Amino acid sequence: MTPVELSRTVLCAVRSAVDAGELQVDVPVRVVVEPSRPGGRGDYATNVALRLARSAGRPAPQVAEVIRRRLTGTRGLARVDITGPGFLNLTLDRPERGARELIALILREGGAYGHGDAFAGRTTEQAVADEARAEAVGHAVVRLIAAQGGRSAVRRAAPGERAVIRPVPAPDGTADGDPQAVRWSLLHAAPHDTPRPWTAYAPLRAENPLFRVRYAHSRTHALRRNARDLGFAAEPGELPEARDGASGQTLVRLLAAYPRTLTAAATHQAPERLARHLVDLADAYLRFQGEYRVLPSGDEKPSAAHRARLALAEAVGTVLAGGLTLLGIHAPEHL
């Protein structure tokens, strides 16, 4: 169920409650459904009950309960919860993909994996502050919205106009240096944090998160080249370590969560969410590679496990490359 379909489903629940006399309100034209914020419950959330509470003459949690009952059992929804002052939290019902199916999907879709239609049919404009970091964030948001089927553009806010995108400005000199490191420094920090100098992201050292992301990506390509030299190719398969190993479980979870991260990053104009997801994925992959041999050693023949691990590596490389591209950063095959 896409966010657009989910919005229509909630709207239909409100309308049916009104038709049944359970709510005495004017049915809204549309219902806004957004990805759950960090620490929230479920996949999506809506404040429709809070919006309707005053006109209904009832507390928002009671309005939410009426809508929740109407939504319970809806095809495509696993559960509906009420949290806080009356938010409806929606968990999608989707069959859990095994590692084989997930990896095959990523390799099949390539760089388009994780792209969706959350902004389909919508055209937006990003008014940004006249400052290097705001412009970098604005352009990243445009790419993220395009990946969700929408269209957007960046413009500088007019004098006296409130900028939509206005993170803490970058210190003087932050934008003067290696373009890749500069862009990462401007996008990796949360909007309310001052970005670190670009020089922190230029060294080829393990403490540099940008280096780890780009290094992990280049390692996946190196493994592919080496496997080709050994005469075998990737083949998605079930990974025992994806069930029993902590690093394998983490990798599969992060790969599966990537589409939700892209949707949330576009919705909340937060490219730092994507940047941090890429760091988590790269770190998980480097741990995995340290624990499990992707390529055969010595006289060992390539096995199904080797082919499956190579497919996992290629899936990780695909996601890392796609995420870096959306941030406007090059994903090198050699590093």
Image (cartoon, rainbow, N blue to C red):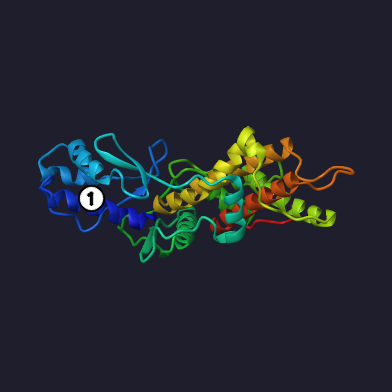
Q: What residue sits right under mark 1 in the picture?
A: 13
Secondary structure beneath dot 1 equals helix
**Residue 9 placement, left or right of 35:** left
Residue at (22, 38) in percent of width and height: 65
Q: Estimate the x, y position of residue 264 in percent, counting from the top left.
A: 43, 49
**Among the 4 quarters of the image, the one containing residue 3:** bottom left
Q: Nearer the viewer, residue 159 or 122?
A: 122
The three-letter amino acid code for the residue at tag 1 is Ala
Name of the residue lying farthest toward the right? 299
Seen from the viewer's position, the closer of residues 10 and 46 is 10
Q: Is 166 above or below relative to 150? A: above
The percent coordinates of residue 13 (x first, y second) are 23, 50
Vertical side of 73 occupied by 136: above or below: below
Number of labels in the image equals 1
Q: Which quarter of the rendering shows the N terminus? A: bottom left
The image quarter containing residue 119 is: bottom left
Using the image as rendered, state which of residue 144 and residue 161 is in the foreground: 144
Q: Is residue 267 left or right of residue 67?
A: right
Mark 1 crowd level (few <14, some 14–19, many ≥20, 10 Å Cα): many
From where the camera sits, is residue 196 visible?
no
Frontmost residue, 157 versus 218: 218
Q: Position of residue 279 (x, y in %)?
A: 59, 43
Q: Residue 28 at x, y = what percent?
A: 19, 55
In the figure, is residue 11 to the left or right of 237? left
Q: Is residue 198 visible?
A: yes
Q: Residue at x 58, y 51 (%)?
A: 101
